[in-house]
Image: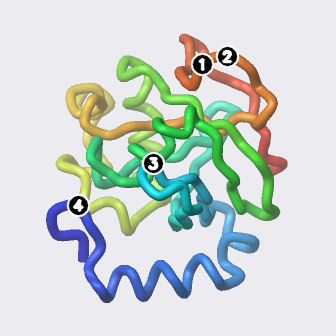
């Protein structure tokens, strides 16, 4: 469904139903990310699974570095709107590679649909996740008014989501 890192027609149809349906408001890991497109400036809506880890919520790019939403988030300076329970303005702060491994492992525990897209088993030891962490961008979801660069410094914490 994601040949070359892009959704095919079937995946796009599933995405359309997901973003317009009730799941992002009901399921604990389901979310919809609205981010400004880097080329057109139009709002792009992307279904995501988000996970809670050590008190914060995170989004992981299951298709890796070349994922379109990752490029758009970076171009937008991390500014986005997230529907997760309710709609709210957020800032996505990119987590340093050295801190990604436990978040990716946790993500794969809950986001079962992402497992085929990640190069190792979700049951692999944390050291294996550290080896691939650079291939999968991870963003901490922070309140929109959080200042500073869109890069998380060591020890990212505080969650804007009420779950």
Left or right: where does residue 42 sit relative to residue 142? left
Left or right: where does residue 163 sit relative to residue 31? right
Residue holding disc 2? 148
Residue holding disc 3? 38
- Residue 149 has which mark? 1
Which circle's residue, 4 or 2, is located before the other in the chain?
4
Measure how far apart labels 2 and 1 are at the Cα level.
4 Å
Say which of marks 3 and 2 sits in front: 3
Measure how far apart labels 4 and 3 are at the Cα level.
18 Å
Say which of marks 4 and 3 sits in front: 3
Measure how far apart labels 4 and 1 are at the Cα level.
27 Å
Task: Judge the density around disc 3: few (<14), some (14-19), many (≥20) Cα neighbours within 10 Å.
Answer: some
Residue holding disc 4? 5
Residue at figure coordinates x 57%, y 30% from the top left: 93
Vertical placement of 2 versus 133: above or below? below
Q: Are marks 4 and 3 in contact (CB under 8 Å)?
A: no
Q: Are marks 2 and 1 in contact (CB under 8 Å)?
A: yes
Q: Secondary structure at mark 4?
A: helix
């Amino acid at each position: 469904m994601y040949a070359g890192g892009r959704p095919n027609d079937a995946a796009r149809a599933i995405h359309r139903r997901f973003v317009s349906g009730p799941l992002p408001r009901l399921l604990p890991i389901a979310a919809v990310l609205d981010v400004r497109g880097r080329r057109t400036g139009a709002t792009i809506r992307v279904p995501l699974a988000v996970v809670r880890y050590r008190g914060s919520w995170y989004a992981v790019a299951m298709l890796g570095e070349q994922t379109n939403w990752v490029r758009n988030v970076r171009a937008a300076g991390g500014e986005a709107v997230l529907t997760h329970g309710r709609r709210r303005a957020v800032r996505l702060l990119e987590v340093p590679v050295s801190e990604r491994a436990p978040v990716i492992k946790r993500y794969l525990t809950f986001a079962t649909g992402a497992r085929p897209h990640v190069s190792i088993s979700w049951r692999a030891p944390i050291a294996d996740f550290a080896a691939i962490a650079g291939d999968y961008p991870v963003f901490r979801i922070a309140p929109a008014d959080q200042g500073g660069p869109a890069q998380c410094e060591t020890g990212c914490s505080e969650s804007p989501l009420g779950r």
